[in-house]
Image (cartoon, rainbow, N blue to C red):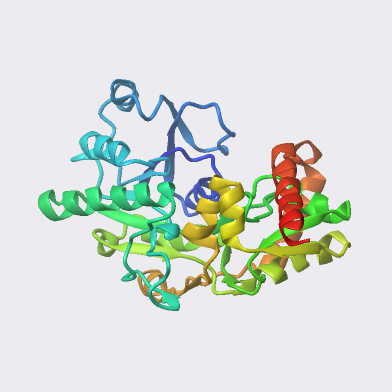
Amino acid sequence: MKVLFIGGTGNISSACTRRALAEGASVYHLNRGTHGTAPEGVVQLTADARDPAAVKAVLGKEQFDVVVDWIAFTPEHVKQDIDMFSGRTGQFVFISSASAYEKPLPQAVVTESTPVFNPFWDYSQKKADCEKVLRTAYEADGFPATIVRPSHTYSDGWFPSIFGASDFTVPQRILDGKELVVHGDGTSLWTLTHADDFAVGFYGLLGNPRAVGEAFHITGDELLTWNQIYTIYGHLVGSEPHLVHMTSQFIAEHDAETGAGLLGDKAYSAIFDNTKIKRFVPGFHATISFHEGIRRSLAYLEAHPGEKRVDEETNALIDRLLSAWKKAHG
């Protein structure tokens, strides 16, 4: 199978690249070559993915069994993809987001039939708009689109929180005895998925003709409260976390960007029914627990100390929120 990844060196796409290579696929990356390093065996096509002329020049007459766009965020991006890859691929996979599902959630358990509508988060709204463009192209012209909605997915060296995931800020605050912000009372349920697990389900959709015209989310089945998530960090770094709970609305009022990700996603319990992906990819099952995933992240940073980064802007934001909360609530 010949697969083109637009992007390919990110948090999730790197794991999917490794999986595809391990399964014997011929993997091509189309990107500017400025972010990350592709593993040995990947064919690198260097161009700005949003420059149609440059993309056409570097692709030449290449045809692909599957094209996956990891970095499409607006309807304009996917319209360009449709124009570029119509007649050039047997399947086009768009990476959407599980945050696009309706908020507040209309039902406790999310399935692929849950409405896609998020009034709070611009990122999610644009992903939903991309899906509409692709569904229209599939229904009207047979463009072979498959939609995949990752939820909160992380890889080795990442530490998910409401403030991001790609740095060591939260574990370092725990080690330093500093307080952490937790939205609500910390008891809402959340689903975190390791990228290596995601990649197993994802690869099973590639080149699968039954997946064309369909949408899938791919997540783990483990449910944790946000209090438990931070407790796991504390256990693994050997220091007790000091949690300060505040409402999501308060956080949103003091930081619009973090608030959008809360009110549009993380403030709600996220319980996913993975029946559909398991039906299309028999045997798929997430096997990496969050405890094990974070142990792996810590081991990764131990082996790559140069990547152990603390984001001072995030630190400053957390401190500002803590100060404002205490001022408002004594």
In this picture, is 301 found above or below 244?
above
Q: Is residue 310 left or right of residue 25?
A: right
Q: Position of residue 8 (x, y in %)?
A: 48, 40
In this picture, is 85 found above or below 58?
below
Q: Is residue 292 left or right of residue 40?
A: right
Q: Quadrant of residue 217?
A: bottom left
Q: Residue at x 54, y 62 (%)?
A: 266
Q: Position of residue 32 (x, y in %)?
A: 47, 26
Q: Quadrant of residue 286?
A: bottom right
In this picture, is 231 found above or below 324?
below
Q: Residue at x 51, y 70 (%)?
A: 270
Q: Position of residue 178 (x, y in %)?
A: 84, 53
Q: Quick one: 310 or 80, which is closer to the camera?
A: 310
Quarter holding the C terminus? Answer: bottom right
Can see residue 195? no
Q: Quadrant of residue 63?
A: top left
Can see residue 322? yes
Q: Quick one: 327 or 304, which is closer to the camera?
A: 327
Q: How many marks?
A: 0
Q: Quick one: 289 or 118, which is closer to the camera?
A: 118
Q: Quick one: 178 or 210, which is closer to the camera?
A: 178
Q: Position of residue 145 (x, y in %)?
A: 26, 52
Q: Residue at x 33, y 53 (%)?
A: 128
Q: Is residue 53 left or right of residue 290?
A: left
